[in-house]
Image (cartoon, rainbow, N blue to C red):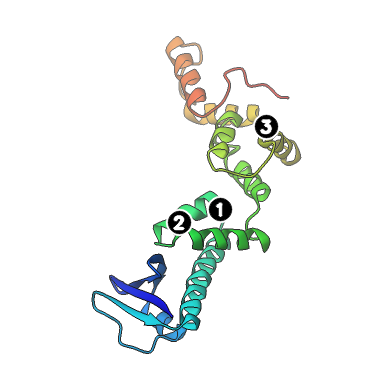
Amino acid sequence: MQLLRLEKVKKNYRVILEEKPLGILDKRELYSAGLDTDLPEESEEKLVTDSLGDVLRESIHFKAYETCVKMLAVTEYSAGELRFKLRFRGYAEEVIDVVIERLYANGYISDERYVESYVRSYAGKKGKRSILFELEQKGLGVSNLESLVDRIYAEEGLSETAARDALLEKKFRNADPEDPAVQRRKRAFLYRRGFRPDTNED
């Protein structure tokens, strides 16, 4: 037998098994898992069979996994971003660890694919320095991130110089290029966007 506690969270229930919060299920999901008693209005503890406890665990894992799959069908996410989203939805770390591992195993998450998508999305808006810094904060399991980013730039025909010139043209189209104040603003703008002031083609 296992000790089950259900805590009401708005219209849903936080499932706590053996004093370990696992995640949140709605009324339909609880009944589908095999719970055959009335659901509490506040908080309630009861003993349930091991088989029901296992089904509840599997239901929470499945719900967390399907949540990630649906998000990944729209856009690429890193494992760190998905962890944050699952934590926000109330899932326990042990659930998140299993889900992330399964997503990697089934090819839904790929650090290299994520980097490729990120570079393509931001190469025209930011400098390589800024892109690298942001990617380094995402906890990706890429051994040589800078080399990978350089390779993506080369394969996609991306150019820091072209991106820099396009952004400057858009931002300072009507400004006097000889004005020292404008030149200072340009340098500051490039710095904030992660471009080197002396950006040149490789």
Q: Amino acid at mark 2?
A: Lys
- The outermost residue toward the front is 1
- Label 2 near label 1: C-beta < 8 Å? yes
- The residue that appears at 40% across and 85% down in the rendered structure is 35
Q: Percent position (x, y) of residue 183?
A: 48, 15
Q: Amino acid at mark 1?
A: Tyr
- The residue that appears at 39% across and 65% down in the rendered structure is 21
The residue labelled by disc 1 is 77
Lateral position of residue 173 relative to residue 124, left or right: left
**In the depicted structure, whether residue 26 falls above or below residue 108:** below
**In the depicted structure, whether residue 117 falls above or below residue 31:** above
The residue labelled by disc 3 is 159
Name the N-terminal-most of marks 1 and 2.
Answer: 1
The residue labelled by disc 2 is 85
Q: Percent position (x, y) of residue 80?
A: 52, 49
Q: Percent position (x, y) of residue 202?
A: 73, 24
Q: Amino acid at mark 3?
A: Ser
* Mark 3 neighbour density, 10 Å: few (under 14) some (14–19) many (20 or more): some
